[in-house]
Amino acid sequence: MWYEGENYHLFALRGLLTGARWARLAGVDIFAEPKLAARVRAALLAPARTALPDFTFPARKDSRFGVSLAQPAYLELWEIGRAGLGKREMGNGKGELESWLTALYQAPAPRPELFESYLHGAPLPRVPFPVSRHALSWWSLVFMTPEPPSDALPWSPGSLLLESQGLAVLRTGGRYASLECGPPGGGHGHPDRLHLTLHADDVHWLADPGTGSYVSRDLFWYRSTLAHNAPRLDGASQSLGAAVCEAFDTSGEWAWVRGRYGEITRTFVAGPAYLLDVIELASRSEHVLELPWHFVGAGDVGRGRWTSGELADEFVSRVEKLVPEGAAPLVLELAAGPRVLKAFLSFDGELVRAEGPGRPGDEKRATFYVMRTAGRSARLVTVLESVGEAASVRAVRVQGSVIEVETAEHAVDRHTATALGWEIATRSGRIRLAGARAPEPPLAPLLELEKPTPVVGAALRVSSPPPLDGTLDGFDTSEPLRLELEDQYRRSEEPYPGPDDFAAVAHAAWDDDALYLAVDVVKSELCIRPGGAPPLRLDNEPDDIHSDGLQVYVAGDEGDGRVGYLVVPETGATGLRVRATSDTSADPGGVRGAWRRTDRGYTVTLGIAWPEWQRAHVGGRLRFDLLVNEMLPGRTRRAGQLVWSGGNGWVFIRGDRQEPERFGILELVG
């Protein structure tokens, strides 16, 4: 699966299949190489295997919400991929892709969606619904096989774990539940590690909201932990780190998954009648642990009254907390049409109710709930049941390490964590779930070009700090860091104009307190964004990248830590406007400096206080990068940027992010 989620996976898949045809014309047949063909087949099947029961894809990360995979723009990807794989996939007519395509063509007609990448192929007004094979675009008609499968097996996906994504999908009949671990997903990722999705009885009870408009303020709501069914600490969204899937296993009608994000673990167990969710915090310090629940449907807690509560967030209103009546657990019952979901909430803490933005495309605000507790060790236990003709779960009891679920037949299922995994003692016997996972090895590309040698520069020790007044005073200029080559330029549209129009020379110095930089930029006409300018509302990019200015990154040579700063000269003053880059949690207060206009451009001088994980000493090495943004008159977005470590690519939608593996090396010289 493409690392940014299903929506971007499908877009990338279109490019991959197009490129595969180009490669074939050049004499390289990707589908004829067994290892490459296997990768393509896996990429084709990934969104099918993770699809919701209604054939929409889960809106993970920045994906669009509620989009059907039976759209013609997507159907033709599987048609062309199946044709390319040929006999490897079709075999005896019983391939997975054939079953999947047959199911999509038989699915109810989806709502037509607008896809900019598809308009050239099949304008929407001319596409009939439901879609048939002969109504796809010319691209599909050129390549797909002439006859559809006539005896494809029914599409019946099971539970699975996508190792590289850490995405676990637990299926029982028409019920779908998933837990998200793995990496957050780059620039389109969300702080939603250990998020839970639930779709059952044709109702999407718990959804990943994906993202609405990139140019609407509520983008920041959908990119928050609070907007997901995921845990958070101390009232703040998660940092963009990875979660680890520690265990996954299935046994008959039972399945489980356990994920870990920092000091939080989430254990999710799926049985034939109900789902058990356990959030646990184990920390050396005190924290406030919160778990939002964004259920669809109308309902409330059976016993208790609501009073004024607290939940600080710009998108949240009507916050209340429950004053419960009676013993635990709290029982929340919700109805969506004729369907009912019951949630048994067992924990020591308070339940909060509030309103926030609804799912993307829904203009109404929606009620959600938050379980909240505090301490160094905490546990939140929830049992979920999608009620059929009659409720199955009668009661839930938490007694030490044992969780008991009493069913309608007065039978009791006892859940216990074991050294090997999870055990359920039922009336009919014991179910043991194991499946401990080894760490996922890094991806080994089938074709890997020789990695470039990192660029190396020197920072010279100074006996006293430079004045940092926008001049080169106090800097030794004998070891410059140059940014003046075409392969150091990332373009938006136009190629590198050349060093006479845009270039930079930097000088680095250091002492025990800070790293010092002087950056002399060649640029005849400055385009500096004022601090009080109206917001641009461009995608997921900070406005200050669309200005002449700098991006500076410092990281430990052994992977100890990383900081990044976006630096823009202040208009009408000599000061600098500094903010942390969106891929780091740097402290802008640790940066000081000034800038000055020069005959050929401008000069920025700044000092960066050493992070606590960096010990400066003669002979030390640190990973470092310097980027110089280029803005031109009459543009809304920047034109490009020079990159000390090497650019040779495109800057569009890169934002203020720079991958640590691209950084060069800065040696601390005495």
Image (cartoon, rainbow, N blue to C red):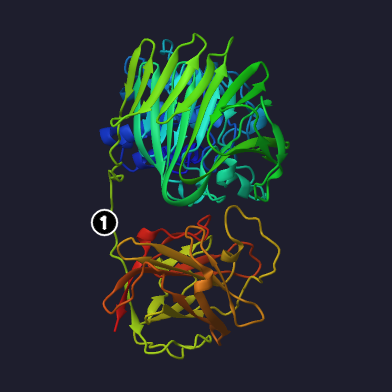
Asked which secondary structure carries label 1, the reply is loop
Q: Position of residue 560 (x, y in %)?
A: 34, 62
Q: Nearer the viewer, residue 67 or 386?
A: 386
Q: Nearer the viewer, residue 199 or 141?
A: 199
Inspect the image, locate mark 1, and give the three-letter code of the amino acid beneath it. Glu
| Image quadrant containing the N terminus | top left
Q: Is residue 111 left or right of residue 662?
A: right
Residue drawn at (49%, 24%) of the image: 397
Q: Is residue 10 left or right of residue 82?
A: right
Q: Nearer the viewer, residue 564 or 595?
A: 564
Disc 1 crowd rating (10 Å Cα; few below 14, some 14-19, many 20+) is few
| Image quadrant containing the C terminus | bottom left
Q: Which residue is mark 1?
A: 450
Q: Position of residue 264 (x, y in %)?
A: 43, 43
Against 587, is 520 above or below? below
Q: Nearer the viewer, residue 279 or 199?
A: 279
Callout count: 1
Res 99 quadrant in image? top left
Q: Position of residue 221 (x, y in %)?
A: 62, 46
Against 80, is 317 above or below? below
Using the rendered image of the protein, determine whether residue 130 is visible from the camera's viewpoint: no
Using the rendered image of the protein, determine whether residue 178 is visible from the camera's viewpoint: yes
